[in-house]
Image: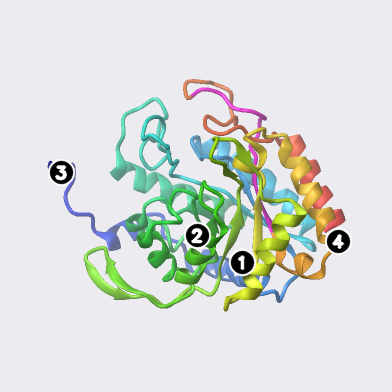
Amino acid sequence: MSFKALSQPINFEQVKSLSKLTPKQAQNKAIRDQELRDIIEGKSEKILLVIGPCSAHNEEAVMEYVHRLARLQEKVQDKIFMVPRVYTNKPRTNGDGYKGLLHQQNPEGESNLIKGIAAVRSLHNRVITETGLTTADEMLYPENLEFVQDLVSYIAVGARSVEDQQHRFVASGIDQPTGMKNPTSGNLNVLFNSIYAAQQKQEFIFNGLEVESSSNPLAHVVLRGGLNEYGENSPNYHYEDLLKVVGLYKAGQYDNPFIVIDTNHDNSGKQYKEQIRIVKETLFNRTWNEEMKKWVRGFMIESFLESGRQEADGKVFGQSITDPCLGWDETEELVKYIAEHA
């Protein structure tokens, strides 16, 4: 067993010089970051939407989508704070298939991770520069966090990563709000163990150094459904599910209780139009319980220019090549509904 080096050691400082924010852009990001922090800490009652394509495979399509999102954000800014999903790593359960922009800048091309780092930073930077919005990305590989941490406002830890100790410990050193998804089993105790670990100081080895993390009081719950022992979808966004999560938050010593509903994945069974119904049901459920209304204030929604999905060799501009997504017209209508009923 061995590992073959495909590049020279990566200079992190040199990487960070690529697509670096100007002072004005950095100031805009700091303002957005504080508003997002206020939402997680309960100082603002706005609804958080982490919204966008399943995977950012086409830069120009992503930018067209985010420009539309920025115009929509202006219309709903009193009630909603939107963070566009610019997910540049795509986890694959069996390791096959398209792995995201970091690996392949062209879904049908060869893998080149060095060029991928530059492409990822460029895309996050373009969103900030051209629209004023700031982005979310998924921490699929903890050692890659330093490549984007200065450019993103929200980090997600996925269902297959949340049980991993390295992901939990690295999450404890992140400044941004960090959404921890329940594992694919749906086990809530595992989820809350990850929240607890992320909200503590931790000592561990990270990128070749012994480090102590700061703790992350903004780490929080993301409910994405699970699979039961028969491989069947087991949603966890219903009223009784949310009561359980509220109860687990109350039973432990957790900072900033906050609950995000992932409306796709195992909550919808990847039936992407179900996302609309799931959002509406959740908004209705919040009206029956004050603690639920206080803490359930976020949605992850998979959305792109065109509805559905296509294969990686498809030529439909703005249509997902990974999980199916809501199209733009459906997205715009749903965001306006949330603003009216939040």
Query: Which numbered disc, 2 or 4, marks the residue that appears first in the sequence?
Result: 2
Query: Between marks 1 and 2, how big is the CA–CA gap?
Result: 31 Å
The disc placed on residue 32 is: 1
Dividing the image into 4 quarters, which one contains the C terminus?
bottom right
**Which amino acid lies under the numbered mark 3 shown in the image of this protein?**
Phe
Asked if 107 appears above or below 124 in the picture, the reply is above
- 333 vs 21, left or right, is right
Query: Between marks 4 and 3, how big is the CA–CA gap?
Result: 55 Å
Dividing the image into 4 quarters, which one contains the N terminus?
top left
Q: Nearer the viewer, mark 1 or mark 2?
A: 2
Query: Dot 3 surroundings within 10 Å: few (below 14), some, or many (20 or more)?
Result: few
Asked if 311 appears above or below 94 in the picture, the reply is above
Mark 2 touches mark 4? (CB < 8 Å): no
- Identified at 65% across, 67% down, the residue is 258
Q: Where residue 79 sits: x, y (%)? A: 79, 61
Query: Which numbered disc, 2 or 3, marks the residue that appears first in the sequence?
Result: 3
**Which amino acid lies under the numbered mark 2 shown in the image of this protein?**
Val
- 168 vs 309, left or right, is left
Identify the residue under disc 4: 287
Asked if 322 appears above or below 74 in the picture, the reply is above
- Identified at 23% across, 70% down, the residue is 209
Identify the residue under disc 2: 190
The disc placed on residue 231 is: none
The disc placed on residue 3 is: 3
Query: Dot 2 surroundings within 10 Å: few (below 14), some, or many (20 or more)?
Result: some
Q: Is residue 125 visible?
A: no
